Image (cartoon, helix red, strand yellow):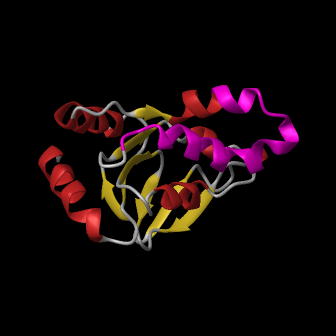
Amino acid sequence: MLAKLERLIGEIGDLNSKLILLVGPSRSGKTQLLRQIGTKLNIEPLNVGLELGRRLAATPNNKRGFSAGELLREITDKERTEDPLLLDNLELLFEPGLQINPLDLVRRLAHSKRVVAVWPGELRGDRLLYADISHPEHRDYSRDGVVAIDI
């Protein structure tokens, strides 16, 4: 799986969307695979929940959704541009109070640089799902324009 991911990272540079999602339920090995590729490429994965959470805590509640994308861009712009961006712990982006589209946010990051992100959900056919349909954080997206690896 590591070799496949490494090959895909090399190939996506010429695509419009340079996004690879590692998709799978909790404890399926997504984070471990992200860390392995990070070690191999000498890149530290970014804990989105921790880094973005710190910044959002200092943002008024009514401005958090508007600020989330901008703050995430500021955080990721600190990373070296030529290296792939490795994103883990995206769950904060699904918080209903933010009223944002997590997949769209990550896709926008992948227009300018290669991004490998852990998707904490499942892949069903051509759909990316997050949380059960009865859960308030439930999301259902088309995987169009995304390279998804089912873990």
- Give the residue displayed 26% in from the left and 38% down from the top: 33
Res. 23 visible in picture: no
Q: Main secondary structure of the magenta part?
A: helix
Check the image and name the residue furthest to the left.
Answer: 3
x%, y% of residue 142? 50, 71
Please tell me in which quadrant of the rendered image residue 31 appears: top left
Evaluate whether residue 111 shows in this view.
yes
Q: Residue at x 67, y 30 (%)?
A: 55
Relative to 82, 134 lies left or right = right
Assess whether residue 77 is covered by the magenta stretch: yes
Using residue 97 as the reference point, say whether residue 103 is left or right of it. Answer: left
Magenta-drawn segment? 54-80
Residue 51 on image: x %, y %: 56, 29
Q: Nearer the viewer, residue 46 or 26?
A: 46
Q: In the image, is 82 to the left or to the right of 124?
A: left
Instruction: Judge whether residue 71 is colored magenta.
Output: yes
Q: Residue at x 43, y 41 (%)?
A: 87
